[in-house]
Amino acid sequence: MREPQLPKLVRQYFKHVLIGFLASAVFVIMLLGFNIANLAHLVATSPLGILAVFLLWVVNGIVFAGVQFGISTMGDDDDDTPGGGLRAPVREYAPVRVPVAKPRRRI
């Protein structure tokens, strides 16, 4: 029996979410490796340091995954139809005189 295939967009989403979380892991490792804002010392000396690193990875992973998927979706150029809409001719407008009755003067 054949397994059902996921739609293309769902497969693309999972792929780019994984890429985003991998980028987040690299980012957090670099933050700790370069000790930005003394973060590595803070994490190492805190009893909740592992939780802080995990949350930093997850939150940045959500952001990076969203950006990665957005870039991949917006840059997707599968559309083979000609773009630009309908090419309607541009009309030239000319002023037209409209007669207006003079208002009556009240005395």
Image: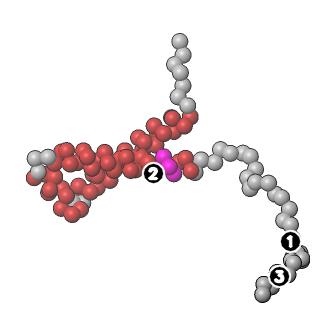
| Residue 104, percent from left and from top | 83, 82
| Residue 79, percent from left and from top | 68, 45
Let me know if residue 68 is in the magenta part. yes
Q: Main SS type for the magenta part?
A: helix
Residue 33 in the image: above or below residue 17: below
- Residue for badge 2: 67
Whether residue 31 is visible to the viewer of this picture, yes or no, is yes
Foreground residue among 98 and 87: 98
Residue 90 in the image: above or below residue 102: above
Q: What residue type is labelled 2?
A: Val
**SS for tag 1?**
loop
**Looking at the figure, which quarter contains the C terminus?**
bottom right
View extreme (top): residue: 1
Q: Magenta part of the protein: which range?
A: 67-71
Asked if labels 3 and 2 touch by Cβ distance under 8 angstroms, the answer is: no
| Residue 87, percent from left and from top | 82, 57
**Residue 90 is drawn in which quadrant?**
bottom right
Q: What residue type is labelled 1?
A: Tyr
Residue 17 in the image: above or below residue 75: above
**SS for tag 3?**
loop
* N-terminal label among 1 and 3: 1
Q: Is residue 88 left or right of residue 80?
A: right
Distance of label 1 from label 3 (alpha carbons)? 33 Å
- Residue for badge 1: 93
Q: Residues within 10 Å of mark 3 (few under 14, many from 20)?
A: few
- Residue for badge 3: 104
Q: Which of marks 1 and 2 is in front?
A: 1
Residue at 55% x, 31% y: name it: 7
